[in-house]
Amino acid sequence: ETRETFPIENRVSNVMLANLDGSEPKRILQVLRGGVSGWLDENRLLVNGRASRDTFDTTLFVYDLRDDSRTEIVQAERIRLTAPSPDGNWIVYAITNDPKPERNGLWLARADGAETRKLDFFGPVQWRDAAQLIYVPFEMNAGHAFYEYDIATGETRRLTPPDQPFTIASGDWSVSPDGKKIVLVNA
């Protein structure tokens, strides 16, 4: 719930929780210019919001419904592509146009805040399962290709053959729920 009467930089969003039938609604937290990015499990939400009115930085954090605790994942002005893993243990996100060039890129963080690592590739990414990401690296003037990144080993392998080029239209692709297929709109 966000009122539209304030200037956009001052809008407060009330994050509400209710039963599926709409009963027992309650406000669980407020964030400045933010909202919920997804569920990690039945008790934890991935949430984003501006850190304060006097900064443009956004904080990405895990909110635990059981004790109202917050675990900060990252704070930056432009956090993009946030996606929790299917088991809720990992979060992938991108930082773009940061004044500190070393912060720009694709990142992988544990939802408990214990580990964060910068990935050595950049581009659209989706979860294949709880342990693997599928991504399309940004390569100037090149066709697209799908790659898989294994979280445990840090290894990358190409999934599509180099002799079968394609171009994804408008970022329109998706991994099947079982992680065995990819659908895309070929430009």
Image (cartoon, rainbow, N blue to C red):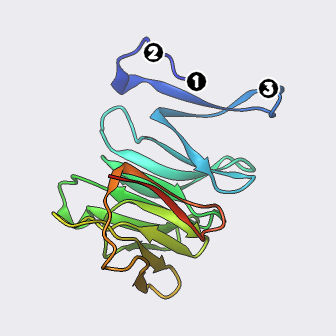
Q: Which amino acid does label 1 sit on?
A: Glu
Q: Where is residue 42 in the image (x, y as percent from the top left)?
A: 75, 53
Residue closest to the far front: 164
- Judging by the rendered image, the residue that carries numbered circle 3 is 22
Q: Where is residue 79 in the image (x, y as percent from the top left)?
A: 36, 50
Q: Quadrant of the N terminus?
A: top right
126 or 160: nearer the eye?
160
Q: Residue at x 25, y 66 (%)?
A: 143
Q: Where is residue 38 in the image (x, y as percent from the top left)?
A: 59, 48
Q: Residue 1 carries which label?
A: 1
Marks 2 and 3 close (CB-CB < 8 Å) = no
Give the side of residue 158 with respect to residue 137, left or right.
right
Q: Residues within 10 Å of mark 3 (few under 14, many from 20)?
A: few
Front position among marks 3 and 1: 3
Marks 2 and 1 close (CB-CB < 8 Å) = no
Label 1 residue SS:
loop
Front position among marks 2 and 3: 3
Picture layout, residue 14 above or below residue 174: above
Q: Which amino acid does label 2 sit on?
A: Glu
140 or 129: nearer the eye?
140
Give the CA separation, mark 3 to mark 1: 14 Å
